[in-house]
Image (spheres, coloured by chain):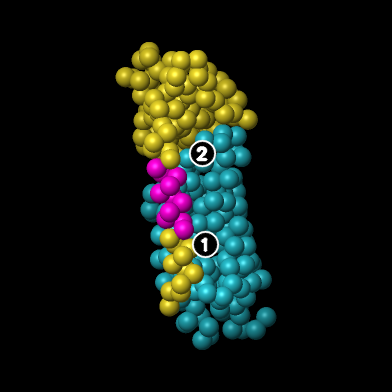
Amino acid sequence: MIKKNDLLLIVAIVFISLAAFAFMFLSRKEGSKLIVYVGGKEHATFSLDEDVEYTVKQENGAYNTFIIKDGKVDMIAASCPDKLCVKDRSIHYSNDTIVCLPNNVVLQIAGGEEGDVDIIAK
Amino acid sequence: MKSSKISRYGLLIALAFILSYVEALIPPPVPIPGIKLGLANLVVLAGLYAMGVKEAFVLSFIRIILVGLTFGNMSTMLFSLAGGILSWLVMALLKQVKGFSQVGVSVAGGVSHNIGQIITAIFVTENINIIYYLPFLLLSGLITGAVIGVLGAMIIKRIKKL
């Protein structure tokens, strides 16, 4: 019952996904700093060179704790119910993010070359 | 409303609940809360083929609200709404195009469901980098859509007989 156009669609989607993966994989570079966004606004910036443990606390009691160790950022604790951000992988490539949507906290890696600023924020 | 229509609605909404429950047991494809597999799309697909475009929209809307109130919260409902409406639109349009079977329509529905969710997540976090999750969601939408397309065809056959 599968028709020709179905297969074309499937092949097109697979192709686009693989192309996107390849592009992301080939163009990724090591980041140099971490930017913490709270509620869509920049809250703090850290260098990836220094190991640190930091907790973002918000007025409503929400908290997110992350560590920077060996140039990688990992979320280790959070007040959100699903803890998806804690389970998420550690990040260190430029533009990688760890998102805690319930608390509206985004950890984003930026930078890559000297003097290169790779921040996209709205 | 004819009793056959009422019973079809009833069956499909009940199915939507069960599928949403099963979906809640499976971990999300990417670590963004509210982004789900979209198994309940099967109900919208079945509604499209066994009932009609308007009925499919009603099904989509009711299952999002009811399931959202039962299993989720305001934010998951927002993602569901974005994904659900976009996928209903895409499926309703694609169904009219010759050469696409229920599987293709379902795949398109699954993929657009996830695209709707990603766009919403980008707006909520005001961070464009969420788009990096798109390839994962395209593939997972494809697989879920294909599975639902096959299962959906079986259900559509039986629901039509009611």
Q: Residues within 10 Å of mark 1 (few under 14, many from 20)?
A: many
- In x, y percent, where is residue B77? 58, 51
Q: Are marks 1 and 2 on the same chain?
A: yes
The chain identifier of the residue carrying mark 2 reads B
Does B90 sit above or below residue A112? Answer: below
Q: Residue lying farthest bottom?
A: B161
Residue occupying the point 67% across, 80% down: B1
Residue occupying the point 48% across, 34% down: A99
Q: Main secondary structure of the magenta part?
A: helix
Q: Colour of chain A?
A: yellow
The cyan-coloured chain is labelled B
| Closest to the observer, A94 or B146 | A94
Q: How many marks?
A: 2
> Which residue position holds label 2?
B130
Q: Amino acid at mark 1?
A: Ala
Question: Residue B58: which quarter of the image?
Answer: bottom right
Does B158 sit above or below residue B103? Answer: below
Q: Which mark is residue B108?
A: 1
Q: Residues within 10 Å of mark 2 (few under 14, many from 20)?
A: many
Q: Is residue A48 visible?
A: yes
**Which element type, helix, strand or loop, lies under badge 2?**
helix
- In x, y percent, where is residue B72? 52, 50
- In x, y percent, where is residue B110? 50, 59
In the rendered structure, does residue A77 fall within the stretch colored magenta? no
Q: Residue lying farthest left?
A: A70
Instruction: Write the start and end of the magenta stretch as one range.
Output: A12-22
